[in-house]
Image (spheres, rainbow, N blue to C red):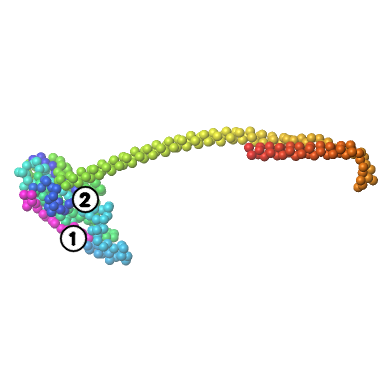
């Protein structure tokens, strides 16, 4: 007989399905064979938590002076912890349904022996539910357990798969650790299969060919979620790339604007050099040369004896005096205007 051994592990489980409390939606179940199922262990998981961690929790709480640090319900604490799973499930099968009914009894006997010795071989995996289903195409075993390990700090007994296996003598870390444990358990199943089926030859150790309908639906739904998440990630990447392209375009536009502004600044600097020289030249040049001032009309020499007294002069002489005075005032106004022009030119040169 050439057959495979299925050894599947998950942290999700349906007790209603495993214990046949709900048969709805399971078309592969032959209800006429329900009595052929074997229920090895059926406990409430909360009861197992109390038995496994109760003393450790009490000892831990007794050392806490602050009430907010005490653990009121360890099961609820772990169940609400996104990083830790409160339980795990192991599904074990030998061969497939197409192997034929002649091997069903032998498979069932091998799985039953494996179930009865599982807890002794795995003391750190506290089993709370174990059932052998013989009402489907191929007999298979469901084992639900709580992995736990001893801790030297804080809570002395905790939930954890890796350390639970390591304390059982399994070597490795992470996926390598699970792989080594899987290899050990699969080797034991193979021994039992060969003991009950003399011509048994393992075709594919650890294959996942066997999967119940609820598990298949769950795996399919998980795949859909992963696919949807992948699509969302790809859309985010496309959006991010588009945004980066926009940033590059904006950067190039800003760079071009910056270079244009630099060119303008350089041009003004060059112009500024010429303006500075012109301004300096304007400042140094004598912008206005005052015209030679013509003396105002001087009347005929008058003796000092006449100063402070009324003097009679001819009308013609008086008119000459007035004309000379007007000419002087006009030249004075022109001079002031010229100075204003010079001052304005100097101010303009300074501004430029």
In-front residue for pair 26/289: 289
Q: Point out the residue furthest to the left here.
A: 102
Q: Secondary structure at mark 2?
A: loop
Segment tinted magenta in the rendering:
31-53
Specify the quadrant of the image occupied by residue 246: top left
Q: Residue at x 21, y 54 (%)?
A: 87
Where is residue 298 drawn, in percent x and y?
Answer: 88, 38
Q: CA distance from mark 1 to mark 2?
A: 19 Å
Q: Secondary structure at mark 1?
A: helix
Quadrant of the frame with the N terminus: top left
Where is residue 132 drawn, in percent x and y?
Answer: 11, 51
**Residue 118 visible in the current orientation:** no
Residue under pointer 1: 47
Q: Residue at x 20, y 50 (%)?
A: 12
Magenta residues: mostly which secondary structure? Answer: helix
Whether tag 1 and tag 2 are in contact, CB under 8 A, the answer is no
Quadrant of the frame with the C terminus: top right
Where is residue 221 drawn, in percent x and y?
Answer: 21, 45
Q: Residue at x 6, y 52 (%)?
A: 35
Give the mark nearest the N terminus, 1 or 2: 2
Mark 1: few, some, or many residues within 10 Å (few <14, many ≥20)?
A: few
Label at residue 11: 2
Specify the quadrant of the image occupied by residue 287: top right
Mark 2: few, some, or many residues within 10 Å (few <14, many ≥20)?
A: some
User: Relative to residue 338, is residue 247 drawn left or right?
Assistant: left
Verify whether residue 39 appears in magenta.
yes
Q: Residue at x 13, y 47 (%)?
A: 26
Q: Point out the residue furthest to the front here.
A: 315
Where is residue 190 drawn, in percent x and y?
Answer: 12, 45
């Amino acid at each position: 007989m050439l057959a495979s051994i299925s050894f599947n592990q998950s942290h999700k489980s349906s007790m209603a399905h495993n214990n046949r409390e709900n048969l709805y939606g399971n078309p592969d179940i032959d209800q006429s064979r329900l009595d052929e199922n074997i229920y090895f262990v059926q406990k409430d998981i909360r009861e197992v938590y109390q038995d496994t961690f109760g003393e450790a929790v009490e000892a831990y709480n007794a050392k806490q002076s602050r009430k907010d640090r005490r653990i009121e319900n360890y099961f609820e604490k772990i169940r609400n912890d996104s990083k830790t799973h409160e339980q795990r499930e192991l599904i074990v099968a030998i061969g497939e349904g197409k192997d034929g009914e002649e091997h069903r009894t032998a498979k069932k006997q091998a799985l039953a022996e494996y179930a009865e010795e599982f807890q002794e071989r795995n003391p750190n995996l506290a089993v709370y539910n174990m059932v052998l289903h013989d009402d489907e195409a191929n007999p298979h075993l469901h084992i639900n357990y709580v992995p736990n390990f001893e801790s030297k700090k804080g809570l002395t007994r905790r939930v954890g798969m890796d350390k639970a296996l390591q304390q059982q003598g399994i070597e490795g870390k992470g996926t390598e650790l699970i792989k080594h444990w899987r290899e050990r358990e699969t080797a034991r199943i193979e021994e039992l299969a060969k003991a009950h089926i003399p011509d048994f030859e393992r075709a594919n150790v650890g294959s996942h060919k066997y999967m119940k309908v609820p598990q298949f639906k769950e795996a399919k739904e998980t795949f859909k979620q992963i696919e949807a998440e992948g699509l969302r990630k790809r859309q985010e990447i496309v959006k991010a790339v588009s945004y980066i392209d926009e940033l590059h375009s904006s950067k190039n536009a800003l760079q071009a604007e910056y270079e244009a502004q630099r060119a303008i600044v350089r041009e003004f600097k060059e112009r500024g050099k010429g303006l500075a020289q012109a301004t300096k030249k304007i400042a140094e040049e004598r912008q206005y040369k005052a015209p030679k001032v013509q003396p105002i009309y001087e009347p005929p020499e008058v003796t000092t004896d006449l100063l402070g007294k009324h003097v009679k002069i001819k009308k013609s002489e008086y008119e000459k005096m007035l004309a000379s005075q007007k000419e002087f005032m006009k030249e004075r106004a022109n001079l002031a205007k010229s100075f204003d022009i010079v001052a304005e030119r100097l101010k303009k040169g300074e501004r430029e």
